[in-house]
Image (cartoon, grey):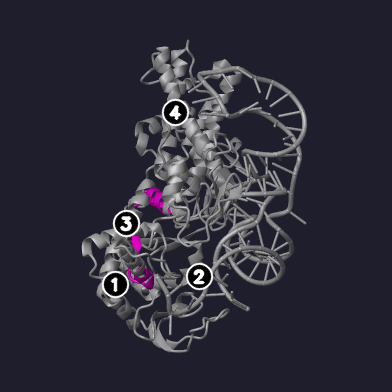
Amino acid sequence: MTLYARFADRIDAILDTLEAEGALPAGLDRRNVAVEPPRDPAHGDLATNAAMVLAKPAKTNPRALAALIAPKLADLPEIETAEVAGPGFINVRLTPESWRDELRTILRDAGGYGRSALGQGARVNVEYVSANPTGPMHMGHCRGAVVGDALASVLEHAGFAVTREYYVNDAGSQVDTLARSAHLRYREALGETIEVPEGLYPGDYLVPIGAALAAEYGDRYVTAPEAEWLVTFREKTVAAMLDLIRADLALLGIHHDRFASEAEVQASGKVKAAFDRLRADGLLYEGVLEAPKGEVPDDWAPVEMTLFRATAFGDDSDRPVMKADGGLTYFGTDLAYHAQKADDADQLIDIWGADHAGTVKRIQAAVKALTKDGNGAAKPFDVKLVQMVRLLRGGEPVKMSKRAGNFVTLADVVREVGKDVVRFTMLTRKADAQMDFDFAKVVEASKDNPVFYVQYAHARIRSLHRRTAEAGLAIAAEPDLTLLDGEEMALVKLAAQFPRIVEAAAVNHEPHRIAFYLSDVAAAFHAAWNRGNDDPARRFLMADDAATTSARLALAESIGQIIRNGLAIMGVAAAEEMN
RNA sequence: GCGCCCGUAGCUCAGUUGGAUAGAGCAGGAGCCUUCUAAGCUUCAGGCCACAGGUUCGAAUCCUGUCGGGCGCGCCA
């Protein structure tokens, strides 16, 4: 239980008491009562808005109600003062010993500090990456991969049971194109001189696939009609592409629990089951769509199709699930796929590139329609859109050849700057904000670079331990933490916010909050360190004072632990030293 | 035409799910610094939170409208 949750309980108990005493009417809605750190530290350690939220329904004024609550808070042993302030806030100051206890808790819980039971084991399916299996991962996929993986990790830390899932689009025309492209390389491997025509995938990564196919099948499919080899080539090539993608993802430390096949969804009874359910609810019908607004495709014609009544759930238009020829649309399968995911999850999250923003409403409509219960309550489903990353080198856009298939691959970038830099940098912006990724800046050793700055703080802390050992100081197993002064304890207060940050990141599906918080922690630690430059008495390592050094080392270690825990969520290794 | 995202310091961005006097870094001004190994430290200045209404104890945050920027619109995937 986090410190804030603990005091929320205390306040709840006090409100119970006030009800029992008749000072408050029973049954007030307390959902908006919050316990938070005040923005201005001068206001104390914790603040609650309880009196302001409850005053109106209790038919009293906030300050009067606060005056009833505050003394009861002040009576608690962990609390030094509880004062009514402003419009009716109650500002609480904890005893120094409470904070020292929190520091001990961080050290004791170690890697477990920051974990919580918030999610209560609810099953969350996070689907991310889901790049088409037509080639290696490129940088366009990278950000979604990192954001999705970090979000999954944040949710795990907040007590959710997470499944990491990848949807493999192995059923559309793109994988047929892939198979034809592989066939071309297969002929090439058998000695033909080939030229990749417009519309096929030209990438070199298909060369070894073609060679493998040639080795396996010899020349039997060189002149055979497509119908004889397409399915086989498609399966083999998709499998090879998935191996490639898995290897690329592994470079980033990403491992999915499940790869769900679009073709398998289609072949299973899932589609029929989902459609039956919708039809039973009157949400599927045969109809003709109006011509799309804006640019109308050349081949558009008003024909009858099977449509999903997406407009009943907030979409702008009903959407086809089956084409006029009876084939499934992409959306039709996707709808069934989401039904499949919802079968064994309590919540769904999709991470999509922002270029798919236009289809968010229809899939949300579908999930609502498919998961709503008798009361109309649907399973929570969030589509997180991840904006594009602009690749720069020293401020100049990275030139990518116009020739299709020649892009900056994820593997190239990881090879150049390292997994940890890629992962951290991808989390230094909100997912829906556009981001620049500058090869020069992300590896810069300066305080402008948050990746470096956070790692540097951790390395300094590790270095302290090494140097303390070298100095032969006897470090106390249970240091006297009363030797820490107010500025030092301010670091503990910042560190104590970590569990709260993790919870907020989980609830809001915003893993970037961890990165920003770690930057704050690093900045605060560096500032404390720098105080030692001006005043040797404030250095962490005091060669002639083992007791103070022990206390400060415990403090430093707690900060190091927070950084490690935060980086672990982000999937970034903490640096032992800087090179 | 419609929809989605966005609009916060000169620039790049945070903003604790509606809290108190809106923050950080860069750039700019002024000092300092040769280190508990180090790639710096302190400090100043900078704001009509695009604009106008609304909701309430309280709005950068929620709602409506306007203006401005980006992206999207399909029987593709």
Magenta stretch: includes residue A166 = yes
The residues tagged by marks 3 and 2 sit, at their Cα atoms, a distance apart of 37 Å
> Are callouts 2 and 4 both on one chain?
yes
The label number, if any, that marks residue A230 in the structure image: 1
Q: What is the crowding at mark 3: few (fewer than 14 residues within 10 Å), some, or many (at least 20)?
A: some
Point out residue B9 in the picture as x, y percentages from the top left corner.
71, 48
The label number, if any, that marks residue A208 in the structure image: 3
Q: Amino acid at mark 1?
A: Leu
Point out residue A4 in the picture as x, y percentages from the top left corner.
45, 42
Q: Amino acid at mark 4?
A: Glu
Residue ID for mark 4: A577
- For the question of whether residue A11 can be seen, the reply is no
Describe the element under mark 3 as helix, strand or loop.
helix
Q: What is the crowding at mark 2: few (fewer than 14 residues within 10 Å), some, or many (at least 20)?
A: few
The residues tagged by marks 1 and 2 sit, at their Cα atoms, a distance apart of 32 Å
Q: Amino acid at mark 2?
A: Gly
The residues tagged by marks 1 and 3 sit, at their Cα atoms, a distance apart of 18 Å
Tell whether label 2 touches label 3 (CB within 8 Å): no
